[in-house]
Amino acid sequence: MVNCLDCTGDGHRDRPAVGTCRHCGAGVCADHVVVVEDRLTRIELLNRVVAVEPPARRLRCHRCHTAHEAATPRGVGRRAARARQEPTVGK
């Protein structure tokens, strides 16, 4: 069983991970996971890009989420990069 890296690193008791960060691969528990939208698209006739609904999910740890937010220039592609914290598993 994989435990949450943030819980272990903070000296808290070991908590089981509910997923892994897509960026760094760390195990994350329900308290440390950030669920963001992953907008997928497909190409239709005449090279028209169409968004696929519903959006997929992407799991990140808080550290990678903060880094991604800091790396995204304000006003440029914010809709695609804007993370929306959704209810997490076990809450």
Image: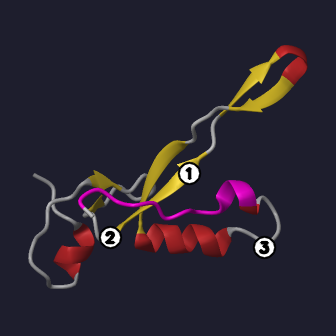
Which of the pair 59/53 is nearer the observer? Answer: 53
The residues tagged by marks 2 and 1 sit, at their Cα atoms, a distance apart of 17 Å
Q: Please, which residue is most extreme toward the bottom here? A: 11
Question: What secondary structure is marked by label 1?
Answer: strand
Side (left or right) of 90 relative to 86: left
Labelled pair 3, 1 in contact (Cβ < 8 Å): no
Mark 3 vs mark 1, foreground winner is: 1
Measured along the vertical axis of the image, is residue 22 above or below residue 72? Answer: above
| Dot 1 amino acid type | Glu
Residue 37, numbered circle: 1
Q: Which residue is mark 3?
A: 74
Q: Is residue 12 left or right of residue 35?
A: left
- In the rendered image, which quarter is residue 42 located in? top right
Residue 28 falls in which quadrant of the image? bottom left
Indicate yes or no whether the magenta region holds residue 88.
Answer: yes
Q: Nearer the viewer, residue 91 or 3?
A: 91
Q: Which of pointers 3 and 1 lies earlier in the amino acid sequence?
A: 1
Instruction: Examine the rendered structure and indicate whether residue 80 appears above or below residue 32.
Output: above
Q: Identify the mark nearer the N-term, 3 or 2.
A: 2
Q: Rounded to the nearest whole Å, what is the CA distance between mark 3 and mark 1?
A: 18 Å
Mark 2 secondary-structure assignment: loop
Tell me if label 3 and label 2 are in contact, CB under 8 Å. Answer: no
Q: Residue 9, how many percent across, how many down?
A: 22, 79
N-term mark: 2 or 1:
2
Q: Residue at x 85, y 25 (%)?
A: 48
**Relative horizontal placement of residue 56, taking residue 10 as reference (left or right):** right
Provide the residue span drawn in magenta. 79-90
Q: Give the crowd class for mark 2: few <14, some 14-19, many >=20 residues within 10 Å.
A: some
User: Could you tell me which residue is drawn at 45 percent across and 56 percent down?
Assistant: 23
Q: Dots 2 and 1: beta carbons under 8 Å?
A: no
Using the image, tell me which numbered label, if any, was put on residue 32: 2
